[in-house]
């Protein structure tokens, strides 16, 4: 990838390993990302052991790249390290609460995006895997994450063995607002989503799922309320167990 405008997710990787030193070098550079109060409220767990990857794959619904990628990266919101520092310095931490989770999750995601951008600039391929929020407790158990550490994002990493077409994006006028939020009347929605709805793959998914339109593919099959409610419950339970709520 020469410029960010050329990026795409990579899901197939060469068997060539990615050295731990290279990952640490990229992590060091990515840690220049903005971070709340310069506290660096995140940790990165690098998994390359095939046995651990296989266990992680279960948590990620057996998505093949979790076992196939040379490295699986779990970006965690982490208040554990900072709290330990406070406790060992006779300072009383007050970070077992939801806002602290949100701040640490923001830190972790900024760090993760910086990491991915830098890795892609160096010729590596990445794919963000959102199933981390589906089975957080499994990931917490597999990786041995202590209290006040929570997995927020997983990224598979390796040298690309594919160069897929770039996916579409909404026109920038559809996502940017000037001065105040301009809500979307139906004709604006029609305009903003027209190109996406007209794509051959969109039409294919509509006909495959027997729906009237693409939005129904999302609401009825891809991201359903039932699944979201079940994931929300699992996430809230895990957040309580990790001491964030
Ligand atoms: C929060 C999040 C969760 C994602 N989860 C998955 C996933 O579970 N499996 C997968 O193959 N891709 C996943 N992706 C990658 C998206 O599918 C991909 O970014 C999107 O389709 C746009 O394609 P592009 O990255 O190639 O531009 C995820 C991306 C994000 C940001």
Image (cartoon, grey):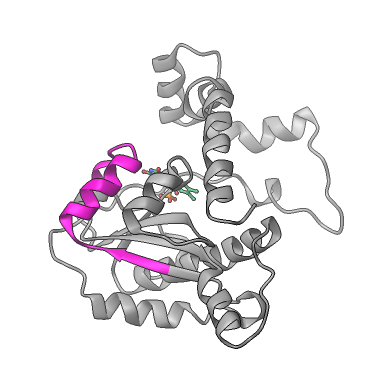
| Residue 51 within the magenta-colored segment of the rendering | yes
Residue closest to the eye, 48 or 218 = 48
Residue 200 % position (x, y): 42, 28
User: Taking 244 as reference, is 227 above or below it?
Assistant: above
Give the residue displayed 37% in from the left and 78% down from the top.
26
State which quadrant residue 131 falls in: top left
Image-based side of 36 in relation to 185, left or right: left
At 31% from the left and 48% from the top, the residue drawn is 164
Q: Is residue 11 shown left or right of residue 182?
A: left
In the image, which residues are magenta?
A: 44-64
Is residue 28 depicted above or below 232 in this figure? below
Percent across and percent down for residue 24 are 33, 79
Residue 75 occupies quadrant: bottom left
- The percent coordinates of residue 226 (x first, y second) are 55, 23
Q: Which of 226 and 197 is in front in this view?
A: 226
Q: Is residue 1 visible?
A: no
Q: In this view, does 185 lie to the left or right of 113?
A: right
- In the rendered image, which quarter contains the N terminus? bottom left
Residue 168 point in image, percent of width and height = 49, 44
């Amino acid at each position: 990838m020469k410029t960010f405008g050329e990026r795409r997710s990579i899901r197939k990787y060469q068997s060539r390993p990615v050295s731990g030193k290279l990952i640490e070098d990229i992590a060091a550079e990515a840690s220049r990302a903005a971070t709340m109060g310069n506290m660096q409220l995140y940790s990165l767990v690098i998994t390359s052991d095939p046995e651990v990857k296989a266990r992680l794959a279960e948590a990620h619904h057996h998505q093949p790249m979790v076992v196939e990628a040379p490295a699986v990266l779990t970006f965690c919101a982490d208040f554990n390290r900072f709290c330990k520092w406070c406790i060992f310095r006779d300072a009383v931490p007050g970070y077992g609460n939801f806002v602290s989770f949100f701040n640490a999750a923001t830190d972790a995601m900024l760090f993760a995006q910086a990491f991915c951008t830098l890795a892609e600039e160096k010729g590596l391929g990445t794919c963000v895997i959102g199933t981390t929020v589906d089975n957080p407790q499994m990931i917490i158990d597999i990786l041995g994450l202590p209290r006040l550490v929570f997995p927020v994002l997983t990224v598979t990493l390796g040298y690309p063995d594919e160069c897929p077409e770039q996916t579409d994006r909404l026109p920038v006028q559809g996502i940017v607002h000037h001065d105040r939020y301009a809500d979307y009347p139906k004709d604006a929605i029609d305009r903003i989503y027209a190109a996406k709805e007209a794509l051959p793959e969109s039409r294919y998914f509509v006909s495959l799922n027997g729906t009237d339109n693409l939005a129904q593919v999302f609401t009825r099959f891809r991201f359903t309320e039932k699944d979201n409610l079940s994931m929300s419950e699992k996430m809230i339970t895990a957040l309580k167990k990790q001491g964030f709520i």
